[in-house]
Image (tube, rainbow, N blue to C red):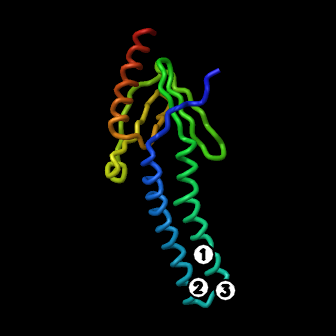
Amino acid sequence: MIGEPQKRISPKALKVWKIYGVIETLIVAAVAAGAITLTVMFEWPQWIITAAVAVLILFTYLFVFFIPTIKWKRWRYEVREQEIELQRGIFIVKRTLVPMVRVQHVDTVQGPILKKYRLATITISTAATVHEIPALDVEEADELRNSISQLARVAEDDV
């Protein structure tokens, strides 16, 4: 039986996911501010203000602190000669095996926040879907992309 994948994504991913959480929290804060403003203007019940503040505090805790930390601890991957194994999930753990013979192409993707922290995401395309390994150091992502590409070519030659 194959054990759990051993490789982890970059620790800098935690910082990036917290930034994404802050951006999402700002959007929720704008909605909460709108609800509070309307409550004051139209003299709606005061529990709406309490609920809006409670939702904002809970959302901030979950999406800025709790979920990024757990997500980083759970995300693992491993590239073997015959397959790529991905493990992710917080409450429901999902393990995916991608056979090398199914890999069509491999890309690295960098958004502005990932670029600032010198991280990249690898996307592995098969005929059916696209798999991702998020937030790897740029050098590691480039090496991994080249390695997967080479292993996929060898696997196709064997078929």
| Disc with the residue nearer the chain's start (2 vs 3) | 2
At numbered mark 2, what does the secondary structure look like: helix, strand or loop? helix
Q: Which mark is residue 52?
A: 1
Query: Residue at (36%, 41%) from the top-left corner?
Result: 109
Instruction: Name the front one of labels 2 and 1.
Output: 1
Quadrant where the C terminus lies?
Answer: top left
**Is residue 95 depicted above or below 45 in this figure?**
above
Looking at the image, the residue that sits furthest to the top is 158
Q: Are marks 2 and 1 in contact (CB under 8 Å)?
A: yes
Q: Which mark is residue 39?
A: 2
User: Mark 3, residues whose alpha carbon is within 10 Å: few (<14), some, or many (≥20)?
Assistant: few
Q: Are marks 1 and 3 in contact (CB under 8 Å)?
A: no
Quadrant where the N terminus lies?
Answer: top right
Q: Which of 108 and 81 is in front in this view?
A: 81
Q: Residue 45 carries which label?
A: 3
> Residue 91 appears at what percent x and percent y?
66, 46
Instruction: Name the front one of labels 1 and 3.
Output: 1
Q: Distance between the residues labelled 2 and 1?
A: 10 Å
Identity, as a three-letter code, of the amino acid under mark 3: Pro
Identity, as a three-letter code, of the amino acid under mark 2: Thr
Q: Distance between the residues labelled 1 and 3?
A: 12 Å
Query: Residue at (62%, 73%) from the top-left corner?
Result: 54
